[in-house]
C-alpha cells in the first residue's frame, strides 16, 4: 500500500471506528487495513488507536494526526478540482463589487467583456464596505490594503497620487513649491466612506513621510466632486492619477509637488478564501492584473 493509501486506511478507520468498515469503504480486507495502520504506527513511533476486543478509539496523537490527514486529502481534492476547472471555458454570471472610482476602470472592463463573451458581468459600484461572502459577490476590487482574513487577494497595481490644481487657481493664489506651502492654500479632501475621516495626503520631505495639518476647504467621500471643484478653481486636491489624467493632458489641471508625493495607492482584487477559484474568477483576476494601467 502506498503512502497516501496508508493514510487513507488510517482516516477511514478513524472515521468508521472499525477496520472492517474501513476495508469495506476501500475495497480491502480488514486484515490489510489493520496491517497498514500498524506499519504507520511503527513508522511514526506513536500509538494512533486504543484497541480492545469491543472497539477502538483514537489516542490524543491519533486525533492530532487525523486533523492533519484530513487537510492533506482536502488539498488533494482541491488540486484535482483546480486542474479539472482549468480546462473549462470561463463562462456564467460574475458578480463583482467595485468602488465608485471603479467607473474609471470601465475601458479595461469593456476589454474583458470582449475577451470573454461567455461571462456575464454583474457590476456593483459602491464605496461602502461590502461583505463579500454574505452578499454573494464572486470578487471585489478595492483600493488600499485588504484587511479581511477570510479573503484571498492579488494586487492589481500600485499608483502614485497626484496633487493638482487648475491654472486659474494657481494664477490667483500662487504655486506651492514645497509641501509646507499647502498650509496657505485651499485644500479639497477625500473622506473615508466607512469612517468619515479625511484621507491623509502622502507627502514627503527629503524622502521622509511628512504629516501636515492641511486646511479643509471642503471634503467629499467620492472623487468626482473633487475633480470638478479642482477644475473650477476652488482649491488643490490629491487624487488618483487615472482620475485626472485626461484633465492634465488637456491642461485643465496642473500637477504639483511631484517629487514630494509617495507611492501609496493600490488596487487589489479579493475573493473568498474558502471558495474554489473558478475559471471565470481566475480569468478576471489574471486579465485585470495583466491589463490594468494605473499610471
Image (cartoon, rainbow, N blue to C red):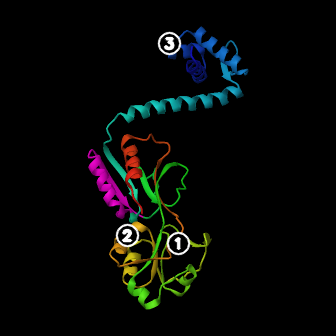
Crowd rating for badge 1 (residues with CA inside 10 Å; few <14, some 14–19, many 20+):
few
- Can you identify the residue that label 2 sits on? 245
Give above or below for 278 relative to 84. below
Whole-Å distance between the Cαs marked 2 and 1? 18 Å
Q: Position of residue 52 (x, y in %)?
A: 70, 14
Q: Is residue 164 above or below residue 174?
A: above
Q: Position of residue 26 (x, y in %)?
A: 51, 16
Magenta part of the chain: 102-126
* 3 inside magenta stretch: no
Horizontally, residue 15 falls left or right of residue 279, namely: right
Residue 87, x across and y down, in percent: 35, 33
One can see residue 37 in this view: yes
Indicate which label's residue lies in the foreground, 2 or 1. Answer: 1
| Labels 2 & 1 near each other (Cβ < 8 A) | no
* Quadrant in which the C terminus appears: bottom left
Residue ranking furthest to the bottom: 172
Which mark is first along the chain, 3 or 1?
3
> Residue at the location (37% across, 49% down)?
287
Q: Nearer the viewer, residue 140 or 23?
A: 140
Residue at label 3?
A: 27
Question: Which residue has dot 1 on it?
Answer: 259
Is residue 179 found left or right of 168 in the rendered image?
Answer: right
Q: Residue 136, can we see it?
A: no
Q: Earlier in the sequence, mark 2 or mark 1?
A: 2
**Is label 3 in a helix, a strand or a loop?**
loop
Count of numbered badges drawn on the protein: 3
Q: Which residue: 65% across, 28% down?
A: 65
SS label for mark 2: helix
Element type at mark 1: helix
Of the two numbered discs 2 and 3 in the rendering, the one whose residue sits closer to the viewer = 2
Q: Quadrant of residue 29?
A: top right
Amino acid at each position: 500500500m502506498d503512502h497516501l493509501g496508508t493514510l487513507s486506511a488510517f482516516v477511514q478507520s478513524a472515521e468508521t471506528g472499525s477496520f472492517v468498515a474501513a476495508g469495506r469503504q476501500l475495497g480491502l480486507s480488514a486484515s490489510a487495513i489493520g496491517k497498514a495502520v500498524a506499519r504507520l504506527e511503527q513508522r511514526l513511533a506513536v500509538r494512533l488507536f486504543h484497541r480492545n476486543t469491543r472497539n477502538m478509539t483514537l489516542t490524543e496523537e491519533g486525533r492530532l494526526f487525523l486533523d492533519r490527514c484530513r487537510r492533506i486529502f482536502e488539498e488533494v481534492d482541491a488540486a484535482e478540482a483546480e486542474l479539472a476547472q482549468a480546462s473549462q471555458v470561463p463562462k456564467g454570471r460574475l458578480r463583482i463589487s467595485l468602488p465608485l472610482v471603479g467607473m474609471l476602470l470601465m475601458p479595461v472592463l469593456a476589454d474583458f467583456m470582449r475577451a470573454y463573451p461567455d461571462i456575464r458581468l454583474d457590476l456593483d459600484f459602491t464605496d461602502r464596505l461590502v461583505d463579500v461572502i454574505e452578499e454573494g459577490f464572486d470578487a471585489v476590487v478595492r483600493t488600499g490594503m485588504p484587511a479581511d482574513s477570510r479573503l484571498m487577494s492579488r494586487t492589481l497595481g500600485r499608483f502614485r497620487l497626484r496633487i493638482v490644481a487648475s491654472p486659474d487657481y494657481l494664477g490667483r493664489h500662487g504655486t506651492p513649491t514645497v509641501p509646507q506651502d499647502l498650509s496657505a492654500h485651499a485644500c479639497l479632501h477625500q473622506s473615508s466612506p466607512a469612517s468619515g475621516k479625511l484621507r491623509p495626503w502622502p507627502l514627503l520631505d527629503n524622502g521622509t513621510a511628512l504629516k501636515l495639518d492641511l486646511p479643509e476647504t471642503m471634503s467629499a467621500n467620492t472623487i468626482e466632486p473633487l475633480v470638478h471643484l479642482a477644475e473650477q478653481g476652488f482649491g488643490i486636491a490629491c487624487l488618483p492619477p487615472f482620475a485626472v489624467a485626461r484633465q492634465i493632458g488637456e491642461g485643465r489641471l496642473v500637477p504639483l509637488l511631484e517629487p514630494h508625493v509617495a507611492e501609496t495607492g493600490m488596487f487589489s482584487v479579493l475573493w473568498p478564501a474558502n471558495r474554489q477559484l473558478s475559471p471565470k474568477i481566475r480569468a478576471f483576476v489574471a486579465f485585470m492584473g495583466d491589463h490594468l494601467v494605473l499610471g
